[in-house]
Image (cartoon, helix red, strand yellow):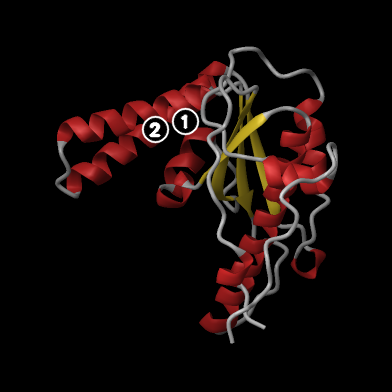
Amino acid sequence: MTSTMTMPLETAPPGTLTEWMRERRSIRRYRAEPLPPGLIERLLDAARLAPSAHNRQPWRFALLQDAERKERLAAAMGARLRADRMADGDDPDAIAADVARSHARLTSAPAIVVACLTLADMDRYPDARRAEAERLMAVQSTAMAVQNLLLLAHAEGLGACWMCAPLFCPDTVTAALALPSDWQPQALITLGYPAAPARRRERRAIAEIVRT
């Protein structure tokens, strides 16, 4: 049976968690100013407070703030993106534009957090079915940690964007940043003060996504 629930309140008191959830948007362009000392540490502290499967806390984070590391990552991921799209037979001009856009987004962000997971402390099973379920538990746990980070970033006046590109080239990200071998890159979160207001996008109504 389709839900008859209605949309909750469109507004929320300022400075509340509800407001942060309703107003947060993905920001892809940032001002050049650096972030204040200690701010990213607060965001990462919020991330580590998330719930996790078995309380194993499988998330790991690599922090990039210096231009050299951001450039190295952007160049490596751009080369992989170009190779993949060339193999697909895509238009070279479209590929060049896509690579340039990706490069600009990474190198212009004042800070990047690379969200990874490790299975080192997760349960181990001899069969593929349960092993895959355990891996997905780590993925879900890491996603919850990133959501904590995104919400606090918004509350602190920052813009942020969750980019899933590492899923297409985890080995490239690992090599570019010399990450530990058990860290599996899941996402990049770019961070900075917004250069322009966010574009609002509609969310599906509760009636479309809930059954009672």
* Residue 112 image point, x, y percent: 60, 31
- The residue wearing badge 1 is 73
* Residue 186 image point, x, y percent: 55, 50
**Observer able to see residue 42:** yes
Q: CA distance from mark 1 to mark 2?
A: 5 Å
Residue located 69% across and 49% down the image: 147
Q: Relative to 79, say whether 21 is above or below.
A: below
Name the element at disc 1: helix
* Residue 20 image point, x, y percent: 75, 42
Residue located 73% across and 59% down the image: 8
Label number found at residue 207: none
Based on the displayed image, in which of its 4 quarters is residue 3 positioned?
Answer: bottom right
Q: Relative to 56, say whether 146 is above or below.
A: above
Based on the displayed image, in which of its 4 quarters is residue 209 positioned?
Answer: bottom right
* Residue 34 image point, x, y percent: 67, 15
Q: Relative to 138, say whether 18 is above or below.
A: above
Based on the displayed image, in which of its 4 quarters is residue 195 positioned?
Answer: top right
Q: Residues within 10 Å of mark 2 (few under 14, many from 20)?
A: some
* Left or right: 23 in relation to 184: right
**Observer able to see residue 75:** no
Q: Residues within 10 Å of mark 1 (few under 14, many from 20)?
A: many
* Left or right: 38 in relation to 25: right
- The residue wearing badge 2 is 76
Q: Farthest residue toward the top?
A: 33
Name the element at disc 2: helix
**Marks 1 & 2, CB-CB < 8 Å contact:** yes
For badge 1, the amino acid type reads Leu
Closer to us: 40 or 64: 40
For badge 2, the amino acid type reads Ala
Quadrant the N terminus occupies: bottom right
